[in-house]
Image (cartoon, coloured by chain):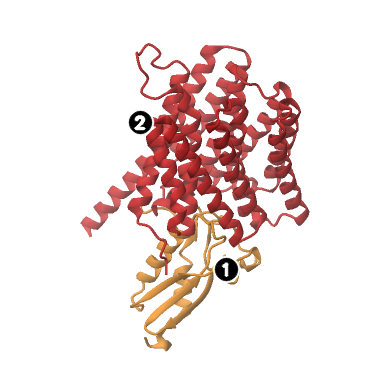
């Protein structure tokens, strides 16, 4: 008996709020870069970029994905709170919005801990640490820590979630037990290094950067993507997204070893977006063909068009990072606007394919 | 239900059309289908998913139900998710080829 099953309408509504978090988060990012700088008031605060992208978008989406998997009504509290926080952050009562996003992250931590309780495996533990990282970041955010001191915890949320998911999926590759222990050790060490940044930012981030390169190297070696890149359609596409995403992780690690963990300015922008755009959005592109059917029940028909946003995503990110490294604000601006364009083109492509398939299906039913 | 009419092979064959999009393999060869049996007038398909947090659970439930619904000889069915025994990679059919076919295509 699936007592926790909720209707597709509820799922789609929450997906809608995740999309609102994404779109407004992207818009807020553009405002940070000077978009609408002449306007007397900004429709979305430039300070909302991080909270909207991490909590409003990723928190709602990942919380929704887990709740739908568990089919427990209480598990939906996390994405509902995240969605409500998005609305409040946008509508004005920012403090209430911040508290809701903290509650949402506590809810998500409980959900992920419950998953670990159900199946105490290392991949569930890594994902639970991911949710707990979001919670830590949100606690620091609420008590007023500067964003640069907590942003690593926010980044750890999608990163650890993805690391755990890839380890889980790559069981089919049967990595040796020793390799699995190494992966867990690298990740636990990386979390420890993030904590160390609060005591010594330079040493902590240096260790974190080395371990991050190790994690990326492990994923490249053991991920099924190296095989599936020879496949076709979404499978090949996903493999390319995964491998390029791991590539950006290595570059982020090297960047961290070279420049440390900046607290502001172009280098800070470059490092964060290598992680959030280069790795996290690559992973979102990689998993879209699975995430969307898992929540909507509808497959996204493949089209080679999807390579366009992928190429633009990486091309413009490279442009942005070059602009950051060389202190060329215009180049950085072009790159960041291009990143937004790439994400919107990807989303637009997904929506177009879903709607087209739906129309064609209706036409077939009418004709038969 | 006439138990002799329950053709497990035919049902398993139908369920081979249900592909786990994450792995590109059908759920029978993945070892996810644990049992096909009658329970009164109802055909019960017991299956599992790869983890309790598997995002594909809802999708697979829908596809298993669609597969069973498409069989004329089945009047009533239940697709039941079970957690025991816990699935592991040793349950996968030997020599199965992952991603042998592209992820299932939507009807276009």
Count of residue discs: 2
- Residue at the far left: name it: A366
Is residue A289 rendered to the left or right of residue A147? left
At 28% from the left edge and 48% from the top edge, which residue is drawn?
Answer: A359
At 54% from the left edge and 52% from the top edge, which residue is drawn?
Answer: A110
Residue A232 seen in the figure: no
Q: Position of residue A264 (x, y in %)?
A: 60, 19
Q: Chain of mark 1?
A: B
Residue A201 seen in the figure: yes
**Camera-nearest residue between B5 and A8:** A8
Q: Position of residue A288 (x, y in %)?
A: 48, 44
**Callout 2: few (<14), some (14-19), or many (20+) C-alpha neighbours within 10 Å?**
few
Instruction: Name chain A's colour.
Output: red
Residue that mark 1 sits on: B31
Task: Give the spatial CA distance, label 2 vs label 1.
Answer: 49 Å
Query: Splitting the image into 4 quarters, where does residue A257 fall?
Result: top right
Is residue A286 rendered to the left or right of residue A91? right
Query: Splitting the image into 4 quarters, where does residue A350 fall?
Result: top left
At 59% from the left edge and 44% from the top edge, which residue is drawn?
Answer: A132
Instruction: Name chain B's colour.
Output: orange
**Camera-nearest residue between A215 and A14:** A14
In the image, residue A65 above or below residue A148: below
Q: Chain of mark 2?
A: A
Of circles 2 and 1, the one toward us is 2
Q: Quadrant for the N terminus of chain A, please.
A: bottom left
In the image, residue B54 above or below residue A189: below
Residue that mark 2 sits on: A91
Q: Secondary structure at mark 1?
A: loop
Q: Position of residue A46 (x, y in %)?
A: 45, 22
């Amino acid at each position: 008996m699936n007592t926790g099953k909720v209707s597709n309408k509820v799922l789609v509504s929450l997906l809608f709020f995740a999309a609102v978090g994404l779109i407004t988060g992207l818009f807020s990012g553009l405002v940070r870069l000077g978009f609408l700088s002449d306007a007397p008031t900004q429709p979305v605060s430039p300070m909302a970029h991080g909270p909207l992208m991490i909590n409003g978008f990723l928190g709602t989406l990942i919380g929704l994905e887990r709740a739908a998997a568990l089919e427990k009504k209480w598990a939906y509290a996390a994405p509902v709170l995240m969605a409500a926080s998005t609305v409040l952050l946008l509508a004005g009562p920012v403090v209430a919005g911040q508290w809701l996003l903290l509650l949402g992250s506590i809810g998500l931590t409980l959900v992920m801990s419950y998953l670990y309780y159900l199946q105490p495996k290392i991949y569930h533990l890594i994902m639970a640490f991911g949710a707990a990282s979001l919670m830590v970041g949100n606690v620091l955010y609420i008590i007023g820590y500067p964003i640069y001191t907590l942003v690593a915890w926010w980044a750890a949320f999608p990163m650890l979630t993805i690391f755990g998911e890839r380890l889980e999926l790559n069981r089919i590759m049967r990595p040796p037990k020793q390799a699995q222990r190494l992966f867990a050790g690298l990740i636990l060490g990386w979390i420890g290094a993030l904590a160390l940044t609060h005591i010594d930012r330079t040493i902590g981030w240096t260790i974190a950067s080395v371990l991050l390169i190790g994690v990326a190297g492990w994923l490249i070696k053991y991920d099924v993507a190296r095989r599936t890149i020879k496949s076709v359609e979404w499978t090949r596409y996903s493999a390319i997204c995964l491998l390029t995403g791991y590539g950006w992780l290595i570059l982020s690690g090297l960047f961290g070893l070279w420049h440390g963990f900046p607290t502001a300015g172009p280098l800070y922008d470059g490092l964060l977006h290598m992680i959030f755009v280069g790795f996290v959005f690559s992973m979102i592109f990689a998993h879209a063909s699975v995430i969307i059917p898992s929540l909507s029940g509808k497959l996204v028909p493949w089209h080679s068009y999807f390579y366009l946003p992928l190429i633009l995503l990486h091309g413009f990110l490279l442009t942005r990072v070059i602009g950051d490294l060389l202190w060329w604000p215009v180049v950085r601006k072009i790159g960041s606007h291009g990143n937004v364009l790439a994400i919107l083109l990807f989303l637009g492509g997904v929506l177009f394919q879903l709607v087209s398939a739906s129309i064609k299906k209706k036409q077939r039913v009418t004709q038969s | 239900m006439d138990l002799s009419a329950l053709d497990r092979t035919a049902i398993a064959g139908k369920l081979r059309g249900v592909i786990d999009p994450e792995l590109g393999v059908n759920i029978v060869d993945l070892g996810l289908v644990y049992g096909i049996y009658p329970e009164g007038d109802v055909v019960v398909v017991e299956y599992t998913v790869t983890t309790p947090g598997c995002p594909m659970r809802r999708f697979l439930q829908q596809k298993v139900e669609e597969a069973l619904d498409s069989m004329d000889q089945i009047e009533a069915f239940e697709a039941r998710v079970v957690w025991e025994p816990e699935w592991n990679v040793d349950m996968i059919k030997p020599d199965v080829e992952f991603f042998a076919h592209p992820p299932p295509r939507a009807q276009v």
